[in-house]
Amino acid sequence: MYNQIVSFIKTLYAGTEGTIPLHAPCFAGNEKRYLEACIDSTFVSSVGKFVDRFEEMVADYTGAARAVVCVNGTNALHMALLLAGVKQYDEVITQPLTFIATANAISYIGARPVFLDVDRDTLGLSPAAVEQWLKENAQMRGDGCYNRTTGNRIAACVPMHTFGHPVHLDELLEVCNRYHIAVVEDAAESLGSFYKGKHTGTFGKIGVLSFNGNKTVTTGGGGMLLFQDADLGARAKHLTTQAKLPHRWEFVHDAIGYNYRMPNINAALGCAQMENLPLFIEKKREIAHRYNAFFEALPVSFFTEPEGCQSNYWLNTLIMPDKESRDEFLAYSNDNGVMTRPAWRLMTQLPMFEQCQHDHLTNAHWLEERIINIPSSVVL
Ligand SMILES: *Cc1c(COP(=O)(O)O)cnc(C)c1O
């Protein structure tokens, strides 16, 4: 069976030379032209018209009231948590099945992640698990939600839309609103994914995108903050640009700011990539459709978008029957010219986070043993 799968992937990516990668970027539009224009203008760094244009393009596409660029997705998450009011010693609910950046960003503030289980039908944070944990641990006080045992404030909740598949946002927002917990969406993987017709990252107080080289749209490295509240977006712009007050020559700063602004040369790449985003999504969904049809006849399940969602299928995902078959297929495919990867090791199994609070994590463990990502690049 494994050779059948590998042959199918090789047919799907027949034009690829050498090992078929998991996700290669696609530069088929105005990338070179905009980079050249950027270099010719000499404005390659912290000011320039591509930065503003890129923010506008992403805001338009996602429907956010304001979008603010960052150096990368990890910095954008850090900034989002600061703007959501997370402070040292606060607790932040998130999922253990995620890329390390989610948990790291929480730690940069000195806050502590609480890892709760995921749903099997979304691969992301389970509203039922959050509800259950809050019922057992939370206590409402005048200024917010507190953990009865630790005495710390439960300041925010960071769901992550795993491999581009949206979590159950309505249910999650309902629970978090009831407990006055701010929601920051880690939408780093879900540019082009919609929940009930609305773009991911625009449901919570703040959403975060990543434009790393392996994401659906890349700027080399980059990130974006999405806001429903344009004033909070303006505050983000101020803080990500060293909190400098506008003046023709004086250097005056009114807060501890950050140098988190994306350089114009990266934004130039982003503008060209955004022009092709609708095409990328169309192609990615087409690839997922072909995988889905192929795997129907095999005892391996191909993960499809949750009900009511339109997913970008950033990384196509298999759910193998068990850990043994996962390991066998990982070895076979990587030995035979097809790059495949398991899910991330759960955050609760890493030395920095093994002391953190968590629930039973039944689904997270079950999925971690079975997930395999298979090649998902757009080829035009
Ligand atoms: C890619 C990614 C990020 C951000 O990564 P950067 O490389 O810093 O842009 C954050 N969270 C998740 C889940 C990601 O996949």
Image: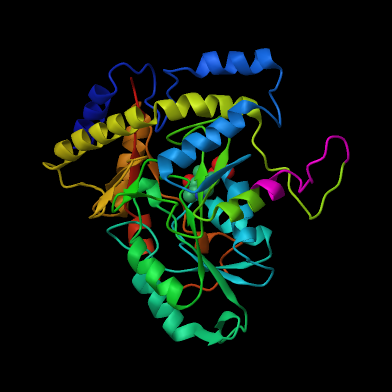
Q: Quadrant of the C terminus?
A: top left
Q: Is residue 238 magenta?
A: yes
Q: Is residue 179 left or right of residue 101?
A: left
Q: Is residue 181 magenta?
A: no
Give the quarter of the image for residue 282.
top left
Q: State the residue at coordinates (63%, 72%).
A: 90
Indicate the position of residue 122 as horizontal and vertical percent values: 31, 57
Give the quarter of the image for residue 45.
top right
Indicate the position of residue 163 as horizontal and vertical percent values: 38, 46
Is residue 149 positioned above or below 340 on the image? below
Residue 362 in view of the camera: no
Indicate the position of residue 49 as horizontal and vertical percent values: 62, 27
Is residue 60 positioned above or below 353 on the image? above
Is residue 151 positioned above or below 171 on the image? below
Give the quarter of the image for residue 219.
top right
Indicate the position of residue 85 as horizontal and vertical percent values: 63, 66
Q: Quadrant of the N terminus?
A: top left
- Magenta stretch? 237-250
What type of secondary structure mainly makes up the magenta span? loop
Residue 210 in view of the camera: yes
Colouring scheme, one of rainbow, by chain, secondary structure, one colour? rainbow
Is residue 317 positioned above or below 279 on the image? below
Q: State the residue at coordinates (39%, 33%).
A: 22
Q: Is residue 222 left or right of residue 116?
A: right
Residue in front for this viewpoint, 14 or 197: 197
